Amino acid sequence: PTPYLDSAIRALRDGGLIALTATDLAPLCGVYPKVALRKYGGLSLRTEYCHEIAVRLLAGSLAMMAAKHEIGVRIVFSHSTDHYVRLYALINYGAKRADESLGDIGFILHCFKCFHREFHKSVMLAQNMACPECGSTMKFAGPLWLGGIVDREFCSLMEENLRSLKHINDSRVARIISLVKEEANAPATYYVIDKICDKIGVPIPPIKSVINHIREMGFTATRTHFHDRGIKTNAPASAVVRAVKDSVGH
């Protein structure tokens, strides 16, 4: 959608809603990071949560393009389904709103050795940073959107409207909205249990068990629509690994 972003943004009135769909997931998911840089203004990274990175690169591209016209954006809904990612954002005029949006632009740093990840606003911090957990060199994606990618209230309105459409009985749409709504206040990125189990050499436990163990440690944890075996949590990677081990009795 990037060739049409500028025209689409300028065509919207203040408070308008813009919907973007990206089907070129190979660049956005880290297969061709330089293509993502050319098209979306940020490097992609092939991690287990690459589909969320794809959404955040798309959102970042929108925010940076809108800021050129002193327009801010607020992402109200986004999802990754089948072979595409899609987001919906409200447009707000004003230099202050544009500056606020740019404040949500930054970088995701990822350690491929121990699953640790961090978020930084400065490219200087993102480059050649050593993982504080294991000492390995961390890789980064961005610049991209670090702010919220779903609004809980907007999801509730979508559910209400879906219920009012008596002639539409799409359980898949309802499930996607419900899952996305659940992760509305969750932090960026997610952990895929299968990847952790493969790395540490243990059987794959039930995802509910891992979530319960994370919550027992005092952290938040919820499932994500991005991946059937994915968990969004504010727990550090070491705590997630511990929860996985506890779930299989190690």
Image: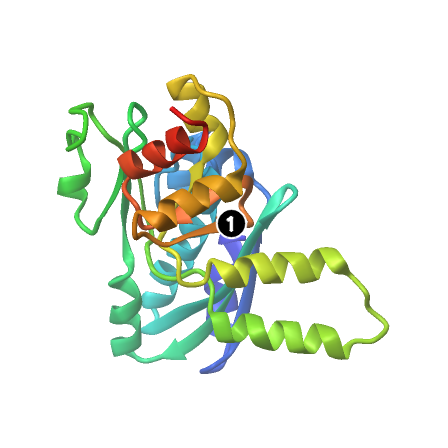
197 and 8: which is toward the camera: 197
Tag count: 1
Quarter-wise, where is residue 100 in the image?
bottom left
Q: Residue at x 27, y 63 (%)?
A: 102
Near mark 1 (Cα within 10 A), the count class, few <14, some 14-19 or many ≥20, is many
Left/right of residue 127 with respect to residue 176 in the rendered view: left
134 and 249: which is toward the camera: 249
107 and 114: which is toward the camera: 114
240 and 93: which is toward the camera: 240
The answer to whether residue 36 is visible is: yes
The quarter in which the C terminus is drawn is: top left
The picture places residue 167, in percent across and down from the top left corner, at 86, 72
Judging by the rendered image, the residue that carries numbered circle 1 is: 224
Quarter-wise, where is residue 206 in the image?
top right
The answer to whether residue 140 is visible is: no
Which element carries disc 1, helix, strand or loop?
Answer: strand
Quarter-wise, where is residue 139 in the image?
top left
Residue at the extreme bottom of the image, as rendered: 14
Q: Residue at x 81, y 65 (%)?
A: 169
Q: Is residue 70 above or below residue 220?
A: below
The kind of residue on which mark 1 rests is: Thr
Left/right of residue 126 with respect to residue 85 in the rendered view: left
Left/right of residue 136 with respect to residue 147 in the rendered view: left
The picture places residue 95, in percent across and down from the top left corner, at 27, 76
The picture places residue 226, in percent across and down from the top left corner, at 53, 46
| Colouring | rainbow
Q: Residue at x 15, y 29 (%)?
A: 130
Residue at the extreme top of the image, as rendered: 201
Q: Residue at x 18, y 31 (%)?
A: 133
Residue at the extreme front of the image, as rendered: 249
The picture places residue 30, in percent across and down from the top left corner, at 43, 32
